[in-house]
Amino acid sequence: MSKADNIFAAMCKDIIENGSSSEGQTVRAKWEDGTLAHTIKKFAVVNRYDLSEEFPILTLRPTNLKAAIDEILWIWQKKSNNIKDLNSRIWDSWANEDGTIGKAYGYQLGIKHKYPEGEFDQVDRVLYDLKHNPYSRRIIVNMYNHSDLHDMNLYPCAYSMTFNVTGKKLNGILNQRSQDVLVANNWNVTQYGILLHMLAQTNNLEAGDLVHVIADAHIYDRHIPLVSELIKRTSFPAPKLLINPERKDFYDFKVEDFILENYLCGAQISNIPVAV
């Protein structure tokens, strides 16, 4: 069994057996039929993935790595808030008529800020620090901008990254305010695993630990039977991640530069209901 499968199964089991239900509380999300979408949750879940040991993609069911990479490039590389720049349809429900999701995610990363060293957006500041001062304890990206929240169609879920170099290893802490565990957990883990690999390769570093902190890790009521079945499945060994070694500039990476070798996994879960 891959370590990512172990971490995921243990988290889900803990939520189902020891989590708190939102029944009786006022909740925002609803199912397509208008029914309130209640959850069972755990507060402050912390998962650690050693990227030097394996790439943390689930084998219990497939994760669409290409689409996940496309979205992380949309946010961190293109710094876009327009779904027309994204190949998947995952943001369609939150898009305006002009195709934007408001001043969220990539929009925040693209805002220029003044520093003593010059003017940078948040991504370029990370790249500058990793090159010129890699052992800084101040390499942080934050997309939760309170002055722009009213102009965001969805507040950022995965909202900040703290980068830290230890020796030759680039580590990162992903902070997430809320997560639909079945739908999004491994999607986010693989995305930010890829991001750490990209930043490490372009700065002559090695990808180290990805620590994922989730303030509200929840499983929706209609997902509980699906999750219970999923974590009982047979797991496979983790696949090997291959990255195009020619990429030396963060902005040159493309989706095709990442290949999973020997990715064996269980069947996909079809027709997962999504609460909005």
Image: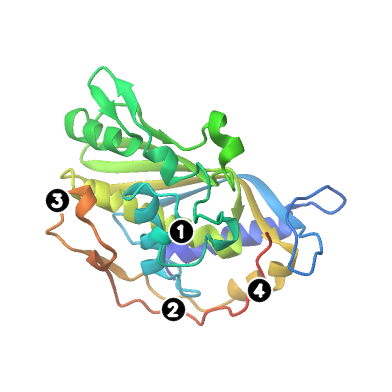
Residue occupying image coordinates x 19% and y 50%: 201
Disc 2 secondary structure class: loop
> Going by the image, does 165 lie left or right of 57?
left
Q: Earlier in the sequence, mark 3 or mark 1?
A: 1
Disc 4 secondary structure class: helix
Q: Amino acid at mark 4?
A: Leu
The location of residue 246, given as percent across then percent down, is 11, 59
Tell which of 212 and 107 is nearer to you: 107
**Quarter residue 18 falls in:** bottom right
Q: CA distance from mark 1 to mark 2?
A: 29 Å
Disc 1 secondary structure class: helix
* Whether residue 56 can be seen here: no
**Quarter residue 3 falls in:** bottom left
Q: Which residue is mark 2?
A: 265
Q: CA distance from mark 3 to mark 1?
A: 27 Å
Q: Residue furthest top?
A: 116
The location of residue 143, given as percent across then percent down, is 47, 38
Q: Amino acid at mark 2?
A: Cys
Tag shown at residue 83 = 1
Residue 182, relative to residue 211: is it above or below? below
Quadrant (top left/top right/bottom left/bottom right) for the C terminus: bottom right
Q: Earlier in the sequence, mark 2 or mark 4?
A: 4
Residue 231, relative to residue 96: is it above or below? below
Q: Amino acid at mark 3?
A: Lys
> Going by the image, does 243 lie left or right of 178?
left
Quadrant (top left/top right/bottom left/bottom right) for the N terminus: bottom left
